[in-house]
Image: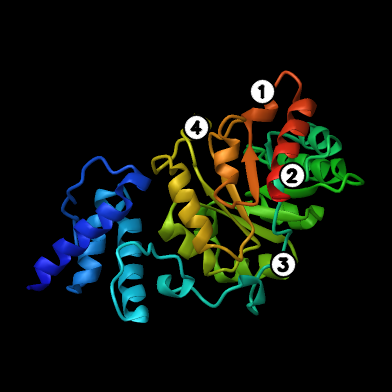
């Protein structure tokens, strides 16, 4: 049997084992656009992951993980989806034990409300929401500084953990609990800026949209990792298709050891299946801000999340 034949057999085996779970449209693998190795497990896995709908960078990441897993175990197993951090080239887990890790936050952040201004932050904090994020969009530096400071003051005495989206230098100065950055914002940090952020003592959360971005986020050992968008969302233009709960569950298994946040298009109907993946937190935007009674809605969500955590 040639290496090419081996690769085709491996691709078919992986799709057969996981196609239903990941919603493959076809039972036959499509051709992967490019290969960086002649290893048959790598090539077959990349063909399969492409057929399963993973974008190029994630199919490449998974293919290398399949090869590493096969080498580590001594044999190829089509049923065993890669979920060991070392097979993805990640450093030893748990991440909090690394010398350069950002400060830890609770393993289960619970209901995580992403809010447009300090007034909403205070309102949801007083309603008992355990984790809140100020996502204030403005090019006015003075307005940003005012809103961040107001949000920090708004959560005082409530017990809510406040993360600031993007404005990390202002968040440090205001004394926020943590900062949340997207991939592009994280990549834009210079080594000196990353060192400054790490030395500040703030917790760091990072958005991810697939395997390659999770591996990149892990390199800085953040306090938590957010994964999405789980479902379609109109709140922001996404570079990747909705991930779905099957992928979210796979991500959660790989990232066990990190506090995990599922985000994107999650509503009350979808909440149970999201929580079933094992993520310890669910981030919402419209579910609270657009609710007729945001406090009552928050109470219902917190009860549902708490019931799952107690199981």
Determine which of the numbered discs, if any, sits on residue 306 in the image: 2
Q: Secondary structure at mark 4?
A: loop
**Disc 1 to disc 4: CB gap under 8 Å:** no
The answer to the question of whether label 3 and label 4 lie on touching residues, with beta carbons closer than 8 A, is no
Q: Earlier in the sequence, mark 1 or mark 4?
A: 4
Q: Which mark is residue 298?
A: none
Q: Nearer the viewer, residue 66 or 234?
A: 66
Residue at horizontal 43 percent and vertical 53 percent from the top = 210
Rendered position, 303 above or below 9: above
Disc 1 to disc 4, C-alpha distance: 14 Å
Q: Is residue 133 visible?
A: no
Residue 162 position in % (x across, y down): 76, 48
Looking at the image, tell me whether mark 1 or mark 2 is earlier in sequence order.
Answer: 1
Per the model, the C-alpha gap separating discs 1 and 3 is 33 Å
Structural distance between the alpha carbons of marks 4 and 2: 25 Å
Determine whether 58 is above or below 150 in the image. Answer: below
The residue indicated by pointer 3 is 103
Which of the numbered marks, if any, corresponds to residue 233?
4
Task: Quickly name the residue at label 1.
Answer: 290
Disc on the earlier residue, 4 or 2: 4
Give whichever of discs 2 and 3 has the lower sequence position.
Answer: 3
Assess disc 3: are there few (<14), some (14-19) or many (≥20) residues with their C-alpha within 10 Å of its C-alpha: some
Furthest-top residue in view?
A: 292
Q: Is residue 274 left or right of residue 16?
A: right
**N-terminal label among 3 and 4:** 3
Q: Nearer the viewer, mark 4 or mark 2?
A: 2
Q: Is residue 225 above or below residue 70?
A: above
């Amino acid at each position: 049997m040639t290496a090419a034949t081996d690769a085709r057999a491996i691709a078919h085996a992986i799709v057969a084992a996981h196609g239903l779970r990941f919603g493959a449209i076809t039972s036959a693998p499509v051709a992967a656009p490019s290969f960086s190795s002649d290893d048959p497990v790598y090539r077959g896995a990349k063909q399969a992951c492409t057929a399963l709908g993973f974008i190029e960078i994630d199919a490449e990441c998974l293919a290398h993980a399949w090869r590493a897993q096969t080498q580590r175990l001594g044999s190829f197993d089509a049923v065993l989806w890669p979920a060991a951090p070392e097979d993805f080239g990640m450093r030893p887990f748990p991440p909090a034990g690394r010398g350069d890790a950002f400060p830890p936050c609770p393993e289960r952040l619970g209901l995580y409300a992403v809010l447009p201004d300090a007034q909403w932050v205070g309102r949801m904090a007083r309603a008992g929401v355990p984790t809140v994020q100020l996502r204030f969009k403005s090019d006015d530096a003075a307005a940003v500084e005012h809103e961040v400071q107001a949000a920090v003051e708004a959560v005082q005495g409530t017990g809510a953990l406040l993360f600031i989206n993007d404005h990390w230098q202002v968040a440090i100065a205001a004394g926020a609990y943590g900062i949340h950055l997207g991939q592009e914002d994280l990549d834009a940090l210079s080594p000196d800026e990353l060192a400054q952020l790490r030395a500040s003592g703030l917790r760091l959360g990072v958005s991810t949209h697939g395997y390659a971005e999770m591996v990149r986020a892990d390199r800085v050992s953040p306090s938590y990792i957010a994964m999405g968008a789980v479902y379609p969302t109109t709140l922001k233009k996404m570079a990747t298709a909705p991930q779905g709960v099957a992928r979210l569950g796979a991500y959660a298994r790989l990232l066990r050891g990190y506090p995990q946040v599922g985000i994107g298009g999650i509503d009350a109907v979808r909440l149970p299946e999201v929580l079933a993946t094992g993520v310890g937190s669910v981030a919402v935007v419209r579910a609270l801000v657009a609710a007729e009674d945001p406090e009552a809605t928050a109470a219902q969500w917190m009860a549902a999340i708490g019931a799952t955590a107690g199981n």
